[in-house]
Image (cartoon, grey):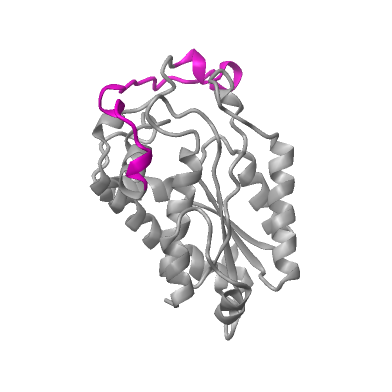
């Protein structure tokens, strides 16, 4: 790993690369891969910051950039958080806008010679990102969405996270663990006593989160730990290897 990548991985949410760093990294590489963290600005209960999803996406992306020769981009910090509108501080953009932002970023990258984009999504409500990737791939562009639910499930099992992905919906064990590891300064007291389970959320899209939780938490944050957070990121970084190999392959048929 180059010194520039080390600096990018060790800084906060913004990469420290110069244009020369990006140019040097691309020399001798058949296909450059850009990694774009996409978070949100929404309530995460009384103990995690509004920027939690952005911090999680950036933590995953930084680990990827430390392990693979990718072009780390700054995050998209506001996305589709309409289900959290009942809580103060939540800010959203429309799915149409988010779709356009991702498409515009991908187009700009291609004009600069970076053909491949991986969107690292930190917010489950960004459903439109899957549509962007599907549409782009159908047009012959190289794009991927990471992590998939299967990657999260593998990470959960390997890290010792007890809560299922169904139960660990929002501000729960996984998010609390990642922030306890990556940004403990942002975790306030209270996560130890705010567990709340609401597994049947079939009307979430119609009623929003406030119909299922008063605190804004759905999950078991009390089970979170920095050790689990570190292991979660390590597992996701390993899982990314398959994506990197697929996206940098010269065999277009391998992408299915």
Q: Nearer the viewer, residue 247 or 223?
A: 223
Task: Report whether 223 appears left or right of 209.
Answer: left
Q: Is residue 17 magenta?
A: no
Task: Report whether 8 appears left or right of 236.
Answer: right
Would you place residue 4 above or below residue 201 in this image?
A: below
Residue 32 on image: x %, y %:
60, 73
Q: Nearer the viewer, residue 238 or 28?
A: 28
Q: Tell me, yes or no, if residue 148 can be seen here.
A: no
Looking at the image, which residue is at 72% across and 67% down?
A: 110
Q: Is residue 184 magenta?
A: yes
In the image, the segment drawn in magenta is: 183-212
Looking at the image, which residue is at 64% across and 52% down?
A: 133
Q: Tell me, yes or no, if residue 132 can be seen here.
A: yes
Q: Quadrant of the C terminus?
A: bottom right
Residue 6 on image: x %, y %:
42, 70
Looking at the image, which residue is at 30% across and 28% down?
A: 191
Looking at the image, which residue is at 41% across and 68% down?
A: 67
């Amino acid at each position: 790993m180059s010194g520039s990548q080390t600096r990018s991985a060790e800084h906060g949410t913004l990469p420290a690369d110069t244009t020369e760093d990006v140019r040097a990294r691309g020399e001798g590489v058949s296909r450059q891969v850009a990694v774009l963290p996409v978070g949100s600005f929404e309530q995460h209960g009384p103990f995690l910051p509004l920027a939690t999803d952005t911090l999680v996406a950036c933590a995953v992306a930084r680990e990827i950039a430390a392990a693979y020769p990718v072009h780390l981009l700054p995050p998209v910090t506001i996305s589709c958080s309409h289900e959290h509108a009942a809580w103060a501080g939540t800010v959203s953009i429309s799915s149409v806008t988010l779709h356009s932002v991702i498409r515009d970023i991908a187009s700009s990258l291609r004009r600069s010679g970076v053909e491949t984009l991986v969107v690292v999504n930190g917010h489950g409500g960004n459903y439109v990102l899957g549509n962007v990737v599907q549409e782009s791939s159908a047009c012959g562009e190289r794009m991927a969405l990471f992590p998939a639910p299967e990657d999260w499930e593998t990470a959960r099992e390997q890290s010792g996270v007890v809560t299922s992905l169904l139960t660990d919906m929002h501000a729960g064990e996984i998010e609390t663990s990642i922030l306890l590891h990556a940004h403990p300064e942002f975790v306030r007291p209270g996560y130890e006593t705010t567990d709340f389970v609401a597994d049947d959320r079939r009307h979430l899209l119609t009623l929003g989160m406030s119909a299922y939780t008063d605190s804004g938490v759905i999950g078991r944050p009390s089970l979170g730990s920095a050790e689990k957070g570190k292991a979660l990121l390590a597992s996701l970084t390993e899982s990314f290897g398959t994506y990197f190999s697929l996206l940098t392959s010269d065999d277009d048929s391998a992408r299915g």
